[in-house]
Image: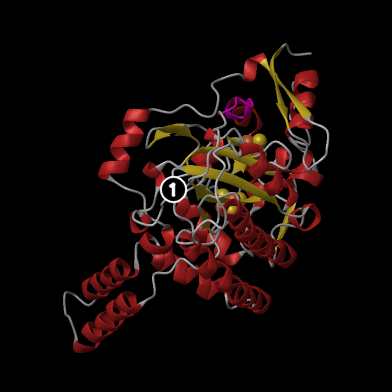
C-alpha cells in the first residue's frame, strides 16, 4: 500500500449526492493545478496571441469536414447539430448586453449560483478569474466580465464506450446542445440576482477553457489533452459563463494526475495516429504532454471523430477516486492491458486490442492541408508552379484566384463543433 500524501474532498456527482474523497499517493504529488511559468504565459499572450483553429487551421478544418461528409450518417449528424445549435449560439452571443432583471443585494451569491448550476445538470462548477491571456485574438473585444463560472456537463457513459462510432458522435453533439441551453437558463438566473452574465457557448469558444477549469479546481490536464474531472475524467463537455456577480474564487487542486499520466500512458500507447507525447514539454509557459495536431486531425477526419484517447482513459471509465484507490493499493493502473479499456474498432480497418495498432501510410497524414484557406491556396499554387517547371499558366492563376476569393468570402463564424483535445 502506497503512502497517501493528501486527500481531496469533492462534491458528489449530482446535486444531493454524498461527497467523494480522492486519496492521492505521496509519490504522485506535484503542485496544485499544473506547473506554470507566468512570465512565459504573459510573453506568449502578448507576442503570439492564441487564435481559434477554425481560423488559423481553416484549410484542414474544411478538408476534414469534406471527408466526414462522405459518410452519410456523419453528414446528417453534423447538419442536424448545426441546425439545432445555431440559435443557441446566437442567443449566447447576445447575453452579455442583457441587463439584470432585479436589484442586487450585495451579498456573495457564489453558493446560489453553484446550486442552480447543479440543479440544471452540470456535474462540475467552479469559479475563477477570467484569464484574458487565453482569449483568441478574434474574440479580444467580446469578453465583458471579470469572473469565469466554469461548467462541465457529463456525456453519457454507454455511447462513449463505443468510440469511435456514430452513436458516440450523436451523444457528443447533443451534450453540447444540452449544456448550451442550460447556460442560457443560468444567464437568466444570474440576471435575476441583479448581475450580468455572458454565456460563452461551448461551440463558439472565446479561447481554450481548460486553464481556467484547472485554476477553479475542477480537474487536471491529462496527457490526452482533455481536462480530467474527478467523476468522469474527460467524458464531459466544457463551457464558461462570465459575470460581474459578487462571487468567491475557487483554488486549484493537486489531484495527482500530472504525475499519474506519466505512469499510466494508456492514451499515449493506444492513439492510432501516434499523436500523443510520452514526455512533457514546456509550451507557452505550461508543462504538458503536447499533442501533434498534424497526426490527430487526419485520424479524426477519417474515423468518426476518433476520440479513442477519451474512451481508453481509466479516469473516464472508473472515476478518479477508484483509479487512485486502486493505484495506492496495487501500484497498478486500473484496467490497463484489458480489452474492455484499451480495445477499439476502426470502421473498415478492424478491431485493435491491447498491444495492437493500425498502420497508416505516410500519405494518410501528408495529404492534409494546413494553415488558413489563403495560406493553403498559395502553398498549393506554389507547388503546382514548381511541378510545371516554373510556368504559371492562366488556368493556374485563375484557380489560385478562386481559392483566395473563397477564403476571403468564407464566414469566420466559429459555429462548428469544437473539440477540447489539446490545451493551447
Ligand atoms: S482523437 Fe487524436 S489524439 Fe485522440 S486518439 Fe484519436 S488521433 Fe489520437
Ligand atoms: S489515459 Fe492515462 S495517461 Fe492518458 S489522460 Fe487518462 S490517465 Fe492520463
Label 1 sits on residue: 145
Magenta-drawn stretch, dominant element (helix, strand or loop) = loop
Query: For the residue labelled by badge 1, is the local secondary structure a helix, a strand or a loop?
Result: loop
Q: Quadrant of residue 54?
A: bottom left
| Residue 59 colored in magenta in the image | no
Q: Residue at x 44, y 43 (%)?
A: 146
In the visual, does 414 lie left or right of 417? left
In the displayed structure, 17 sits above or below 167; it is: above
Q: Position of residue 21 (x, y in %)?
A: 76, 26
Q: Residue at x 59, y 78 (%)?
A: 70
**Quadrant in which the N terminus is drawn:** top right
In the visual, does 342 lie left or right of 64? right
Q: Which residues are magenta?
A: 252-258
Q: Quadrant of residue 406?
A: bottom left
Q: Position of residue 81 (x, y in %)?
A: 62, 72
329 or 285: which is nearer to us? 285
In the displayed structure, 392 sits above or below 130; it is: below
Residue 370 visible at all: no
| Residue 255 colored in magenta in the image | yes
Q: How is the image coloured?
A: secondary structure
In the visual, does 142 lie left or right of 353? left
Q: For ligand 2, which image quadrant applies?
A: top right
Q: Residue at x 58, y 36 (%)?
A: 108
Q: Position of residue 102 (x, y in %)?
A: 57, 54
Q: Quadrant of residue 174?
A: bottom right
Amino acid at each position: 500500500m502506497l503512502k497517501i500524501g493528501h486527500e481531496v474532498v469533492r462534491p458528489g456527482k449530482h446535486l444531493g449526492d454524498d461527497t467523494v474523497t480522492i486519496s492521492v499517493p505521496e509519490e504522485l504529488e506535484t503542485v496544485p493545478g499544473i506547473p506554470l511559468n507566468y512570465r512565459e504565459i504573459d510573453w506568449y499572450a502578448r507576442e503570439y496571441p492564441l487564435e481559434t483553429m477554425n481560423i488559423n487551421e481553416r484549410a484542414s478544418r474544411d478538408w476534414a469536414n469534406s471527408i466526414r461528409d462522405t459518410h452519410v450518417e456523419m453528414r446528417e449528424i453534423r447538419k442536424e447539430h448545426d441546425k439545432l445549435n445555431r440559435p443557441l449560439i446566437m442567443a449566447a452571443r447576445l447575453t452579455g448586453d442583457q441587463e439584470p432583471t432585479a436589484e442586487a443585494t450585495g451579498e456573495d451569491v457564489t453558493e446560489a449560483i453553484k446550486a442552480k448550476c447543479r440543479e440544471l445538470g452540470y456535474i462540475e462548477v467552479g469559479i475563477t478569474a477570467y484569464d484574458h491571456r487565453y482569449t483568441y485574438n478574434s474574440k479580444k473585444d467580446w469578453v465583458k466580465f471579470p469572473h469565469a463560472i466554469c461548467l462541465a456537463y457529463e456525456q453519457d457513459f454507454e455511447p462513449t464506450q463505443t468510440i469511435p462510432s456514430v452513436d458516440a458522435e450523436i451523444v457528443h453533439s447533443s451534450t453540447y446542445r444540452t449544456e448550451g441551453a442550460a447556460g442560457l437558463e443560468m444567464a437568466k438566473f444570474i440576471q435575476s440576482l441583479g448581475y450580468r452574465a455572458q454565456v460563452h457557448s461551448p461551440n463558439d469558444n472565446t479561447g481554450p477553457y481548460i486553464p481556467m477549469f484547472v485554476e477553479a479546481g475542477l480537474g487536471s490536464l491529462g496527457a490526452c489533452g482533455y481536462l480530467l474531472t474527478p467523476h468522469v475524467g474527460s467524458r464531459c463537455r466544457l463551457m464558461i459563463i462570465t459575470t460581474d456577480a459578487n462571487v468567491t474564487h475557487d483554488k486549484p487542486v493537486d489531484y495527482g494526475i500530472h504525475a499519474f499520466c506519466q505512469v499510466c500512458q494508456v492514451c499515449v500507447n493506444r492513439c492510432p495516429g501516434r499523436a500523443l507525447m510520452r514526455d512533457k514539454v514546456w509550451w507557452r509557459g505550461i508543462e504538458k504532454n503536447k499533442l501533434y495536431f498534424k497526426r490527430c486531425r487526419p485520424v479524426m477526419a477519417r474515423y468518426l471523430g476518433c476520440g479513442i484517447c477519451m474512451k481508453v482513459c481509466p479516469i473516464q471509465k472508473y472515476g478518479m477516486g477508484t483509479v487512485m484507490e486502486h493505484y495506492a493499493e496495487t501500484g497498478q493502473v486500473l484496467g490497463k492491458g484489458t480489452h474492455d479499456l484499451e480495445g477499439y474498432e476502426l470502421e473498415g480497418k478492424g478491431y485493435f486490442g491491447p498491444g495492437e495498432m493500425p498502420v497508416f501510410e505516410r500519405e494518410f497524414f501528408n495529404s492534409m492541408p494546413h494553415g488558413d484557406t489563403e495560406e493553403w491556396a498559395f502553398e498549393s499554387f506554389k507547388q503546382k508552379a514548381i511541378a510545371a517547371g516554373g510556368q504559371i499558366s492562366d488556368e493556374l492563376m485563375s484557380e489560385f484566384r478562386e481559392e483566395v476569393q473563397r477564403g476571403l468570402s468564407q464566414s469566420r463564424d466559429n459555429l462548428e463543433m469544437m473539440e477540447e483535445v489539446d490545451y493551447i
